[in-house]
Image: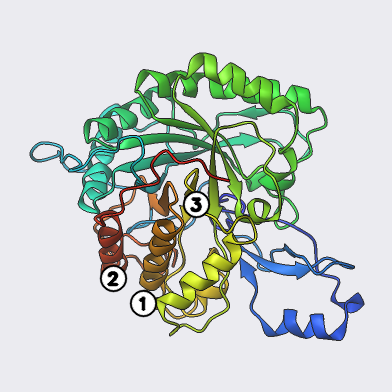
Amino acid sequence: MRNREPLVKNEKTKRSKVPLLAILPVTVTSLVIGLPFVVGDHPLRWRPGSVKPVLVLHDPPPAKGRGGDTVVAAGGGAAAEEPAEPAEPTGPLPKVDRPWKAGMPEWGVQIFWEDKKERSDAYVEKKAREQAAYLVGLKANSVSVSFPFYTEGRTSTKLAAGKGTPTPAHLETVLRVFHDAGLRTTVRPTLDEAVLVPPKGWRGNIEPADKEAWFDAYEAMLGPYLDAAQRQQAATFVIGTELNSMEGDPGWKTLIAAAGKRFKGEVSYDANWDNYVGGRIAVPVKRLGVDAYFPVMVPDDAPVDRLVDGWNAWLDKKSKDALPRIVLSEAGISAMDGAYRAPGDFYAKRKANPAVQANWYKAVCEVVRERRMAGVYWWSVTFDSDPKAAPKEEGSRLDFAGRPDTEREIRTCFGSDYAGPGTDSAP
């Protein structure tokens, strides 16, 4: 979703180098020029000497991105500038009709949260109740709380909570409200990218000068949040998100063992989609999430079955079988023309096209059921936003809250008779 997490340009800011088109064959150059390749948040380029595309950003990043002080809301209705104090909640907190149980699909939403230390406990609780009511209205049974933490640069070994990181106490309040509403909860700290100097720098290509020190700092930073997740009975704690360059490091084993001593729930890792389809994700967790922004090269009026085929073509690169151990930790698309070719493009503001977003959501839900996946979390709703307000023109096209067609598809998906992945093994 997002800084998104690697595919994040306003909310996910990604990677790479300038494409060296001059040295490429004419046919490849023509293809690159002819297709508006922005994958996830990032366009594709071709690595010299290879037929495998890699990602690269071409647009300048916004003044401030997800994880810093965002200029526009990352998701869901009104922009999160300086929200007014929400009204006192009226009536009891709505409850999930069919609470999640093991083997059921996780029908969820990513809540992106940049906290402010001056926010009162009462404010945080009221906003949490407002978002919980919205999610229950969508027939969700799960929610993931994504929030930023910070570093000082690509080679830095320092990691810490910062300006937008919620306090452990505020996190506990939000988790308690969501739990009381019957929602399955996930805690998802995500490395902010503001200082990593996009497009060349993003969370997926950090290179700490001392990786052992980096993991020590990471463990210290995560500790209070693992404790908060344990106290509020969170189901899952995401130990890392889109950290491509760090995958495979032996430090994960020690970190995950330490996390397991403080948090007794499920410890997971969320991989970026390109690394997922391109090879093995070498992080020793039992559960793997995928931030899934697969580009599908079809026109805006393409039928849903062509979108489904496009997704399956990507997933088949990994496995052609069912995927019951895989959850789509992020899925979404901008409600605008041309978005199928760039589902995670957070910068572009082409003509609004709600049907593109609604059809994409319908297709992704079909893929989840067809591949017997563990579920999906839609990116995203901003914690401070009003989810009932129509998206503003200056906001992100990726917003889905307040878009009736997309909300209808979410409710249809979440209310479907898909029983879930069960307990079968999977690749």
Q: Residue at coordinates 77% horizontally, 65% vertically from top-left?
A: 52
* Label 2 Cα neighbours within 10 Å, binned few <14 / some 14-19 / many ≥20: some
Structure colour scheme:
rainbow
In space, the residues marked 2 and 1 are separated at their CA atoms by 7 Å
Kindly give the residue lying farthest to the left in the view shown.
91
Q: Position of residue 166 (x, y in %)?
A: 44, 31
Q: What kind of residue is marked 2? A: Asp
Q: Residue at coordinates 80% horizontally, 69% vertically from top-left?
A: 51
Q: Position of residue 159 (x, y in %)?
A: 65, 29
Q: What kind of residue is marked 3? A: Thr
Residue 348 appears anywhere in the view: no
Q: What kind of residue is marked 1? A: Ala
Do callouts 2 and 1 mark residues in contact (Cβ within 8 Å)?
Answer: yes
In space, the residues marked 1 and 3 are separated at their CA atoms by 27 Å
SS at circle 1:
helix
Do callouts 1 and 3 mark residues in contact (Cβ within 8 Å)?
Answer: no
The reply, left or right, for residue 372 in relation to residue 211 is left
Name the residue beneath numbered marker 3.
70
Q: Residue at coordinates 22% horizontally, 30% vertically from top-left?
A: 180
Residue 405 got which mark?
2
Name the residue beneath numbered marker 1.
355
Q: Residue at coordinates 25% horizontally, 65% vertically from top-left?
A: 408
The reply, left or right, for residue 408 in relation to residue 226 is left
The reply, left or right, for residue 390 in relation to residue 35 is left
**Going from the N terminus, do you reach mark 3 or mark 2 first?**
3
Do callouts 3 and 2 mark residues in contact (Cβ within 8 Å)?
Answer: no
Residue 146 got which mark?
none
